[in-house]
Amino acid sequence: MMTRYWHRRRFPQPRRLGAATAGTALLVTLAACGGEGASPSGAVMRDSAGIEIVENTAPLWAEGEGWELSETPLLSIGELEGDPRYQLYQVYDARRLSDGRIVVANAGSSELRFYDGKGRFKGAAGRKGGGPGEFKGLADVWALADDSLLAYDFRNDRISFFDPSGEFLRSFQLQSLTGGKSSPNLVSPFADGSLLISARTMFFSPQTEGGLRRDSVLYLRCDPAGALLDSVGWFPGPEWYVKSDEGVMAASSRAFGRSPVATAFADAFYFGSSDSYEIAHYDANGQLRRLIRRTHQSLDVTAEDIESWIEERLAEADDENQRTFWEKLYADMPFPETMPAYERLIVDAEGSLWVEEYRRPTDEQPRWTVFDPDGVMLGEVETPPEFQVFQIGSDFVLGRWTDELDVEHVQLYKLKGR
């Protein structure tokens, strides 16, 4: 029997799989049992058994106030033709360093590329391969406190470290954390350099029962050398649909399925299951400290949404046989009545939480709801269509923009109004 797996994201790297712990039942059944107060935004804060709950009903920003991106980017790196050092392909991440340099994870060439504050190429680190400092599936790059770099290679199952100039320092295998008994992925680093890791334990085999699946994900914390520090807890994983047909077993992420998200910051992390508009704030040891909620109505899944979703995925088929198989799979897949509450989480340099709202397949306008470090909803910020946000600083937003010719550009926008 042949087994196939498909798990699609907006860009194809296996990361940011986090969220909602085995305490999910706790999150939805907590009763208020403490003091209560309202902020000027309409947010109500109360205490429940030592856990702060922030209920947001209206934004703090008034009409016409708030933050916004500059109309045009301050910096744009990427060309259709010309110098290959400026031709980007499969840019899966980028970071701005404290000296203004931009580091680009260009997976198409298996390189970390360095550009100065004016976008001029300054050098590169890495190449395709499995040796020290080489990559097969470059996905993430993170700048640590001293501007040293952490790069995640999902195909080599490896975390590699580089100094600020791009010199390779060391690496370790993620599988060493789980003994090969799960599929670990980097979520993000904490401020002290330790790492939040998700370890997916769901495996498929010819004997896997068909239908909808949502198994658990174990979250771990390890030090920068790869030594396990703590098991943070069990979290519900993403929704999958499993189908067997004519000797082939296929596992696909569910259309409009709930896919938990998480991100580490400072000495804590946020997660959300995306089932409802609730995001939990945990400390690094997995202790629940705060629940952030927002009045929200999830989008209904319409026939047009389903048609658009299927068409987009069928267009990615490699040949007619694969297309036919996918058509059968999607014809049997049960679609949910509503879409997830949100899509991604990013914490900016000042500790504010940015939540990317879930959109219909035909909606090209990204929208982010911003919460201050205390969980109070500030308001909404729009980012350009076809722009994938990687990093949000105190006064900038860095990401990848894809033009109408599918040419990739790393762009830096000014964040105004802060």
Image (cartoon, grey):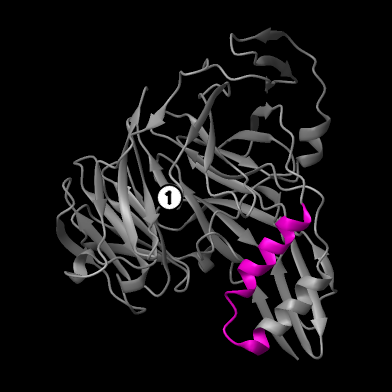
Q: Position of residue 194 (x, y in %)?
A: 44, 47
Would you say the magenta stretch is mainly helix, strand or loop?
helix
* 361 inside magenta stretch: no
For image coordinates 18% across by 45% down, the residue present is: 117
Foreground residue, 367 or 354?
A: 367
Q: Of helix, strand and loop, which one carries label 1? A: strand
Q: To which residue does mark 1 refer?
A: 387
As drawn, is 14 to the left or to the right of 289?
Answer: left
Quarter occupied by the N terminus: bottom right
Foreground residue, 155 or 77?
A: 77
As drawn, is 232 to the left or to the right of 245?
Answer: left
Please indicate, yes or no, whether residue 164 appears anywhere in the rendered image.
yes
Q: 379 above or below 62?
A: below
Residue neighbourhood size for the residue with mark 1, other residues' Cα within 10 Å, grouped as few (<14), some (14–19), many (≥20): many
* 312 inside magenta stretch: yes
Q: Position of residue 58 (x, y in %)?
A: 64, 19
Q: Position of residue 34 (x, y in %)?
A: 75, 12
* Residue range of the region highlighted in magenta in the rendering: 302-322
Quarter occupied by the C terminus: top left
For image coordinates 55% across by 53% down, the residue present is: 16
Going by the numbered disc 1, the residue's amino acid type is: Phe
